[in-house]
Amino acid sequence: MNTATGTSALPYTFLGPEGTFTESALLMVPGAASAERVPSTNAADALARVRAGRARAAMLPIENSIEGGVPATLDAISNGVELRILHEVVVPVSFVLVAPADVSLQDVTHVGTHPHAWAQTRNWFQDHLPDAVHVPANSTAAAAHQLLGAGAAFQAAVCAPLVAEQTGLSVLAAGIEDNIGAVTRFVLVGPPGELPEPTGADKTTLAIPLPEDRPGALMEILEQFASRGVNLNRIESRPTGQFLGHYIFSVDVDGHIRDARVADALRGLHRVSPEMRFLGSYPRADQQPPLIREHNADAAFDEAAAWVGTLLG
Ligand SMILES: O=C(O)C(=O)C[C@]1(C(=O)O)C=C[C@@H](O)C=C1
């Protein structure tokens, strides 16, 4: 990836420290396990490294099957200098509760972890430690690492089983996730450059500001996809931070910008929302090709363009 621009000598970065689910996701990218890896404190920090040319790409969590979008990532990729998603990885998530060896379950009044991990273990805590107070951390592993030093504001942390092995912290409880089979989706984000080749099972991510607050504005955006047979996988709104009621829609759709129906939808969207950002076309982790009706296939777009050409003479 990006070898043409000479970035392959740069390290990868990820939401750290060592042992986050995000690092596991990065290790699933071909070549990343043998490449240099530098942890970042949060999504903004990771993308700042990429934007400054100090990392070739950053792995970040974007969406969880239980808790939905990861706001810090959605905001960091939608604003600032343009970046591109190059790759996606889906990782199953299972959590353990860890603590120093002298702490037992009854001693735990405060628990450190990432907000998404807390949300995915809420019922377990309701059943086993109903009075436990959540102390938010930048990542699950960051919370566990704080327990290794003095002065942590909590006695236990929720993290990946791997972190217990890496740190030597004791496991007070394992498999504490409320939903067996939950997964988190991660994206590898790099500078704009060569697009990943279409595979036939691709995804395109967009950040679309609502240009005007008026009836039908969102409908006008959605109909650009509907009329070209482009399927939406995810849509959520994030405040722009400029003023109350001003939103960017973060959208994933089936298909690659090199697919005629997707390119045509992007042309329509650019007219409706000129500030829209293209955040990349990349292979789907599940390799599931979309269902495309004949009149939305590339050949139908080519034939229609040729027909208009004949009319124009
Ligand atoms: O804290 C970590 O270990 C992460 O990789 C972040 C993160 C997330 O943001 O959703 C990843 C997977 C889990 O859903 C919980 C936390």
Image (spheres, helix red, strand yellow):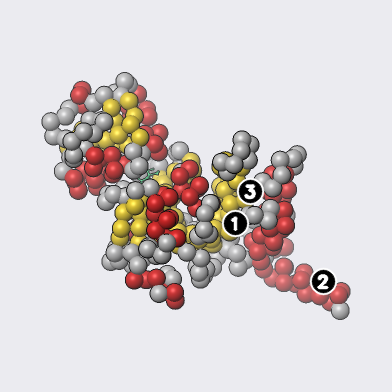
Quadrant for the N terminus, please.
Answer: bottom left
Q: CA distance from mark 3 to mark 2?
A: 32 Å
Look at 42% across and 56% down and name the residue there. Answer: 48
Can residue 120 be seen at all in this image of the molecule? no
| Residue 247 against residue 3 in the figure, above or below | above
Q: Name the one closer to the observer, 159 or 12.
A: 12
- The residue under label 1 is 277
* Mark 1 vs 2, N-terminal side: 1
Can residue 69 be seen at all in this image of the molecule? yes
Which circle marks residue 292 in the picture? Answer: none
Disc 2, SS: helix
Percent x, y of residue 135: 33, 31
- The residue under label 2 is 308
Percent x, y of residue 58: 40, 58
Residue reaching furthest to the top: 131
- The residue under label 3 is 209
